[in-house]
Image (cartoon, helix red, strand yellow):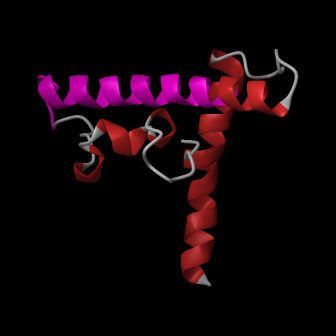
Amino acid sequence: MAVYKELYRLRKEKIERVFADAKEKHSMRYIQYRGLAQVTNWVQLKFIAMNLKKLATWKWNDRHPVPDGPRRTRLPQNASDISLLFPSFFPFTNQKPALV
């Protein structure tokens, strides 16, 4: 139970923050389309943009260390392949798209 309690504590820092950023910074407070297919495509495009911004920040921070301190957060080792980040862009994979 302690493991789940720790994971639930991290939820507000990781998961809920992503949805808050989506609502505030990417105009996802209101839906602009009608129909499940159009809304699904719109949401996937928004989260792909958010993932690309995150990837760009990781890459930038990896190549530009802080002058007087430790390196910034680095790109995780398991995120080296761009197709892993955006499975919905690659129709030959049978994976469901992960929403950030």
Whether 58 is among the magenta residues is yes
Whether 16 is among the magenta residues is no
User: What is the quadrant of the C terminus in the image?
Assistant: top right
Report the span colored magenta: 43-70
The residue at 56%/69% (across/down) is: 6
Main SS class of the magenta portion in the image: helix
Across and down, in percent, residue 93 comes to: 44, 49
Across and down, in percent, residue 5 comes to: 62, 73
Question: Is 65 displayed left or right of 42 in the figure?
Answer: left
On the image, which quarter does residue 75 sit in? top left
The residue at 83%/17% (across/down) is: 33
Which of 44/75 is in front?
44
Across and down, in percent, residue 42 comes to: 68, 23
Which of 99/96 is in front?
96
Which of 40/4 is in front?
40
Question: Is 10 displayed left or right of 59 in the figure?
Answer: right
On the image, which quarter does residue 90 sit in? top left
